Amino acid sequence: MDISIPYYEDNSRISNSSLGWFLQSPRYFRDRLDGKVEEKPTSAMENGTMVHMYLLQPEEFKKTYKVLSFQTPTSQQQKKFCEDYVASTKNKPILRALEAFKNNYSTTGRSEEDNGKKGLEMALKLKHYIKFLRENKNGTKVISWAELETLKKIKENVLLHKMARELLLNNPNSANFKAENEFHINWEWITYKDAFTEEKLLCKSLIDRIVIDHDNKVIKLIDIKTTVSVVNFSNSFKEYDYGRQMSFYWFAIRWYLEVDQKIDLSDY
């Protein structure tokens, strides 16, 4: 199985997400594959990614996220102000501050001088964060102490829940037990144009976690979902078509084990 092309860079294969694009319309599917439409992640999506990484990829989490010890923006406007300040091509701090302030705040009834002063005050207040943005070459994301405490609480709850702990964190040291997180499978779906002509559809899947227990002949597919309401999770299941995703992943796992690994699954 060749996975030399990173999962998110390979547009030659069909994923569960791209099936969702096709269900919107074939044109939307084509535009997404061609990079003509870019989906901006929502805060809910970003939070889900953060939880996922904290639980399943702790080392990657440390590389990706950082809690800063100095004052950071307390609103999206302040955050965007700092980003615009850093991106500005003006040659003086007062001009960069003025430009960033005017981009993000109402300036009605104030002179250019007053707006410049307001912007400069904010730039000085958030100077350490601005410096961090300038020096942050590897794309490290900033999270608050409150967000980190929430993540710690989530993991504590996982450790206290017997089934959740077993599914997400159980890694017995056994040659016959394989647990993989962020498991990339490039696989093929076989279809037929007619009774004699076979066609292969190239597919890809990135599975949160797979557990293969050869001793007990059990295979577990685990996918983390974050939700604001456990009570209404069934609604999310339908809205986001998680059933289709689960089926798509099982096809990927079956192909990987039977075709790539040559394992007879009849007893699993």
Image (spheres, rainbow, N blue to C red):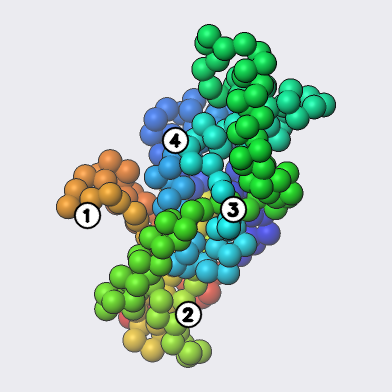
Give percent across and percent down for residue 88: 73, 28
- Measure the alpha-carbon separation of dots 3 and 2: 42 Å
**Tag 3 near tag 2, CB within 8 Å:** no
* Residue matched to label 1: 230
Disc 4 crowd, CA 10 A, few/some/many (<14, 14-19, 20+): some
Residue 54 sits above or below residue 204 on the image = below
- Measure the alpha-carbon separation of dots 4 and 1: 27 Å
* Residue matched to label 3: 70
Single out the mark in the foreground, 2 or 1: 1
Q: Quadrant of residue 59?
A: bottom right
Question: Which residue is depicted at the point 30% across and 70% down?
Answer: 157
Secondary structure category for the residue under label 1: loop
Could you tell me which quadrant the N terminus lies in? Answer: bottom right
Residue 178 image label: 2
Residue 156 sits above or below residue 137 on the image = below
- Measure the alpha-carbon separation of dots 3 and 4: 42 Å
